[in-house]
Each structure stands twice: as structure tokens, then as C-alpha cells.
Image (tube, rainbow, N blue to C red):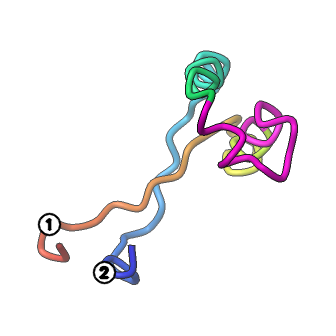
Amino acid sequence: MATLSGKGGEPVLVPIGETLELRLEAMACYASQVPVIFRFSQDFFGVVANFAREVGGERGPAERFWPIARENL
């Protein structure tokens, strides 16, 4: 990540409202990783869903990506 610092473009929001529940169910399949990644919360479903809603704002739940131009790799 440090290598790519400052090389990303403007963030791109991708709506995930239609697939949010399915994504949460898929994340739950990684049972050994969930308690490590979300060690500060007992409600990882809520943490992820709330973050997606916060990122998407009025557009609804979304994921945010920063595109990296090939010449920046």
C-alpha cells in the first residue's frame, strides 16, 4: 500500500444495495477471520452495512475504489 500512496485517482463509488446482504453472508463464511478483523465489535454485519451506507450517502450502500493508472504501478 505504501508503494501506491498518492497514486490513486478520484474515488469511484459502486452501488451495492442489491447485493449487500449476500456480501455479508459471504463474509461470514470466513469464520476464522471475522473475529480478528472485527475484534472491536460483536456486530460485524452492522459495522460493514453502516460503513457502506455512509460511503454511499443518499445513493444507498456503496463500495469505494481508487483507480490506479497502469503507468503508476
Residue wearing tag 2: 3
Q: In x, y percent, where is residue 52?
A: 69, 42
Q: Amino acid at mark 2?
A: Thr
Residue range (magenta): 32-49
Identify the disc placed on residue 70. 1
Based on the displayed image, in which of its 4 quarters is residue 61 positioned? top right
Image check: 23 left or right of 41? left
Q: Quadrant of the N terminus?
A: bottom left
Looking at the image, which is closer to me, 41 or 55?
Answer: 41
Which label's residue is closer to the chain start, 2 or 1? Answer: 2
Identify the disc placed on residue 7. none
Which residue is pictured at 67% across the width and 18% down the height?
21
Residue 44 in the magenta stretch? The answer is yes
Residue 29 in the magenta stretch? The answer is no
Q: Amino acid at mark 1?
A: Arg
Image check: 54 left or right of 66? right
Considering only vertical position in the picture, is 43 above or below 13? above
Structural distance between the alpha carbons of marks 2 and 1: 13 Å
Image check: 44 left or right of 62? right
Considering only vertical position in the picture, is 29 above or below 6? above
Local SS, label 2 = helix
